[in-house]
Amino acid sequence: MMRILVIGAAGNTGRPIAEGLTAEGFTVRTATRDTRPPVTAAEHVRFDWADLSTHRPALEGVDRMYVLAPALVEDPSVLMIPVLERALAGGVRRVVLLSASVVPEEGPGLGKVHHFLRGHVSEWSVLQPSWFMQNFISPVHHHHASLRRDGRLVTATGQGRVGFVDAEDIAAVGVRALADAKSHDTAQVITG
């Protein structure tokens, strides 16, 4: 039975990915920094990119995995690539990475992770969404705050226009990238 690890399973994309895979009958292992499972039908482990003791229990017996960057880390590749190397050595065949539409392959941070996947993982996908719609409703996000305070949305796009995308739509692409029999093996820009 295939087991899929979903790192960040309590988040905007991780939770619906774990739920979608579970609904399709996959064995799902959720991984978060919390010990409480975010999805009731899934196996759950505590996972922290910076805590080596949490890696083996998360990776053991996993065939495919969904990964996103650790929060508040300047260069996530420093923590992510060693974990991905362990995962591949342990039998993981497919990795799906949540990145962003503005992060080029071989760029800093997640760009390095993207490049690593293309060069080292036999089955891979990189999800590159534009801004999340959830940024408008999250009280801790600066877009929400500026809309409430000033009634304006300010970004660094110049005259460019890019649609915001709902995290559920990003998750739907992630589910397909993990569940489809044929690997996508590409970066997928996802816009609203």
Image (cartoon, grey):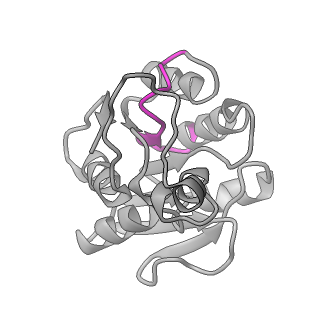
Q: Is residue 108 magenta?
A: no
**Residue 159 occupies quadrant:** top left
**Residue 56 occupies quadrant:** bottom right
Furthest residue in direction left, as rendered: 181
What residue appears at the point 31 percent right and 65 percent down from the top-left corner? 21
What residue appears at the point 43 percent right and 43 percent down from the top-left corner? 131
Q: Residue 8 at what x, y percent from top left?
A: 56, 59
Left/right placement of residue 103 relative to residue 76 reads left
* Magenta range: 89-106
Q: Residue 114 at what x, y percent from top left?
A: 49, 26
Q: Is residue 95 magenta?
A: yes
**Can residue 18 be seen at all in this image of the molecule?**
yes
Total labels: the figure holds 0
Furthest residue in direction bottom, as rendered: 40
Q: Residue 109 at what x, y percent from top left?
A: 64, 27
User: Closer to the camera, 111 or 44?
Assistant: 111
User: Closer to the camera, 125 or 119?
Assistant: 125
What residue appears at the point 26 percent right and 37 percent down from the top-left corner? 183
Left/right placement of residue 89 relative to residue 125 reads right
Q: In the picture, which quadrant includes the C terminus?
A: top left
Q: In the picture, which quadrant includes the N terminus?
A: bottom left
Secondary structure predominantly adopted by residues drawn in magenta: loop
User: Closer to the camera, 98 or 22?
Assistant: 98
Furthest residue in direction front, as rendered: 150
